[in-house]
Amino acid sequence: MDPVVAQAARAALDAERVRLHAELDAGIEAPGQMTYGSQAAAASQVFAQQRDLALHDKGAKELELVEAAIARLDAGTFGTCLRCGNEIAPARLEALPWAAYCITCQKLAADGR
């Protein structure tokens, strides 16, 4: 892999890892004390907590993908599709540095094949 591309990928992955850690470390705010007669407020608090939990889970999964991409970079396999072994398009890696699959294999995986 081109050292300039690898260096740019490392910088992008490190920045994303820092951002995700900060996001995950912020935690989830527990809903405040609810009072009777405020069902709308209670529903809003529960909705907000569920949204925050979903975003936390999404961030944790993204962090796993970023960590795996950094491991592939360290191993020298970064930029190679995990499924077919072909090179992942540089434009794809620029847009999504943690991509593990080429576009074709990603579509196949999304279709369940």
Image: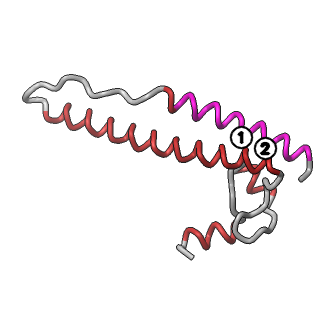
- Disc 2 to disc 1, C-alpha distance: 6 Å
Q: Nearer the viewer, residue 60 or 31?
A: 60
Say if the magenta span includes residue 77: no
- Residue 12 image position (x, y, % from top left): 74, 39
Residue type at the position of mark 1:
Leu
- Which residue is identified by label 1? 13
Q: Position of residue 82 (x, y in %)?
A: 71, 64
Which label belongs to residue 9?
A: 2
Nearest the eye: 45 or 70? 70
- Residue at 67% across / 48% down in the picture? 68
99, above or below 17, in the image: below
Q: Secondary structure at mark 2?
A: helix
Which residues lie in the magenta part? 3-23
Quadrant assignment, res 47: top left
* 89 on left or right of 112: right
Q: Residue at x 71, y 35 (%)?
A: 14
Please tell me how crowded label 2 is: few (under 14), some (14-19), or many (20+) other residues with Cα within 10 Å.
many
Q: Mainly helix, strand or loop, the magenta region?
A: helix
Badge 1: few (under 14), some or many (20 or more) residues near its Cα, within 10 Å?
many
Left or right side of 38 for 77: right
Image position of 62 (left or right of 28): right
Asked if the residue at tag 1 contacts the one at tag 2, i.e. Cβ–Cβ closer than 8 Å, the answer is yes
**Residue, far bottom:** 113
Q: Residue at position x 45%, y 44% from top?
A: 57
- Secondary structure type for disc 1: helix
**Callout 2, which amino acid?**
Ala
The foreground one among 70 and 44 is 70
Q: Position of residue 43 (x, y in %)?
A: 21, 38
Indicate the quadrant containing the C terminus: top left, top right, bottom left or bottom right: bottom right
As drawn, the residue found furthest toward the front would be 75
